[in-house]
Image (spheres, rainbow, N blue to C red):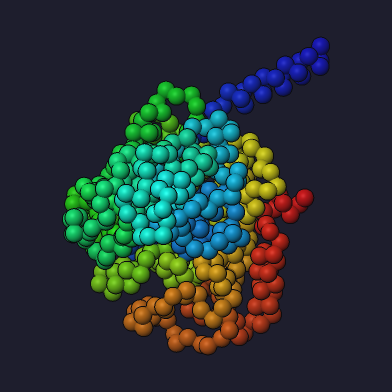
Amino acid sequence: MKNRTILMALCGTAASLMAQPLPNILVLYTDDMGFGDLGVNNPESKIPTPNLDQLAGQGMNLKDGHASSGICTPSRYALLTGRAHWRDFHGIVGAFGRPVFKENQLTLPRMLAETGYTTACIGKWHLGWDWDALRKPGTESRSIQPEDFDWSLPIPGGPLAVGFDHYFGDDVINFPPYTWIEDDRILQAPDVLMDTDLWKPIKEGRWESRPGPMVSDWDPYEVMPTLTQRSVDFILSRKDQTQPFFLYHSFPSPHAPIIPNDEFDGKSQAGPYGDFVYQTDDAVGRMLRALDEIGQAENTIVIFSSDNGAEDYAFARDRKYGHWSSAPFRGRKRDIYEGGHHVPTIIRWPGVVEPGRISTSLFAQTDIMATVAAVVGYELPPNAAEDSFDFLPYLKGGTPAGPRTAMVHNTSRDIYAIRDGDWLLIDAPSGYTRQPAPDEWYERHGYPPGEEFPVELFNLEEDIGQRHNLAGAHPEKVRQMQALLQQHREQGHTAPRLSER
């Protein structure tokens, strides 16, 4: 009788756990947005971000969150695989470039699809497709023309090949083909070559659009509102559905071309870029309100971040408007100074993550994979998510700090940095991967004259702006961190679950 009572109790507990629905997961991923663009991160920001500020107040603002790279494709690959990009490649996928994923590689959408989720990607992809499958024989040796492809064929190797049930977007806003793609099909065949004279004037900077096939009536200004509406519609379509969903909304903004819609002009005090950030914030608000409308806000994990820091235009914006997108950091997109990869990061999970919590624990976007696996009860195999740490106990408040204490930073092939606690070693004479910041930027932000040294060492607890190179004063610390960097690069993984095997 006693054993039967225990068995019934255990069965009741299991049934209760099984009755609890798995949470929906909404990842909001911006493009080239700086840490200091958000008001919640930068009191001196000239850009209103009311929806993101509110999201941070409703969840956890991770003040030490990092993309894998200082550029686009590698960071997206790392987020969707839990594997540091530098183990496999460093650069971006070019126009009509091939997929970066390995065959049958476990990805975040594939894992969630196996767990019973409906999965969708809306927006920028930039991780490659097999465009050669559409290429007509005999056209490979010439510059690409619209007639070189059979646009009626399905495109292999895209989002559907790595676990997404649905895709809608234009792949990359400034790359051909300039047309809409739904799932694995082109919706309208390109019929001309890109011609920016056919478009309305750009509002800041340059178009930066690569030449190639385009639909003759293509309008880049329609990309942002169309993608936003598609995601809102996807969320609304989940009303009364019992199957959980994973939506990866990948913004084209505020990446160049900087083209906020007219209704957002003047909404910031940081020029068109600031207005574009404001429009991005507005789109976030629309999607969050859609969750409210279907009654799923309380059962949805929302993760917001960016693929890297702000582009070079940030210097002119700082000079003209007094808005530094990377504040309080040094560096911008591509750099391995903090401004290149230290990005805004927010996680909201009602009933689990304490509202208004501010985290100073080191967090990498690769950690999303292991954390989500823990949420849905998925056991990661040893050949997956090699650099992903499980943050679930920390999110729940069960541990005082996150599990990660170190992280490798990298953008270009030959320049690496490593974080270890409060210390940051740049294993190169400079963290700039292209030209350094202008002299007037250093003067405006109070940087002392630089000291020539083979490497740079900073204590971020004392010097978050990376003003004072301590390598000369701490040679033993330099050697220790170089050894740790070498270990991380050579051992093939950093995930604790793999180290314990």
Q: Quick check: 183 left or right of 378? A: left
Q: Is residue 22 left or right of residue 333?
A: right
Q: Is residue 2 above or below residue 225?
A: above
**Residue 271 percent coordinates (x, y):** 24, 63
Q: Nearer the viewer, residue 301 or 185?
A: 185
Q: How many marks?
A: 0
Give the residue displayed 25% in from the left and 54% down from the top.
260
Residue 459 quadrant: bottom right
Residue 241 appears anywhere in the view:
yes
**Percent position of residue 49, x then y:** 32, 53
Q: Please state, as top left, top right, bottom left or bottom right, where the N terminus lies in the image.
A: top right
> Quadrant of the rendered structure where residue 265 is?
bottom left
Q: Is residue 107 above or below residue 23?
A: below
Residue 195 higher or lower than 223, as above or below: below
x, y (%) of residue 291?
39, 34
Q: Position of residue 384 (x, y in %)?
A: 64, 48
Q: Return the residue found at the far top.
A: 1
**Can residue 158 be seen by looking at this rendering?**
no
Horizontal side of 148 relative to 156 (left or right) equals left
Look at 72% across and 51% down and name the residue there. Answer: 498
- Which residue is rendered at x = 66% and y = 72% of the image? 481
Residue at coordinates 42% horizontally, 63% vertically from top-left? 309
Vertical side of 249 occupied by 476: above or below:
below
In-front residue for pair 388/113: 113
Q: Residue furthest front?
A: 138
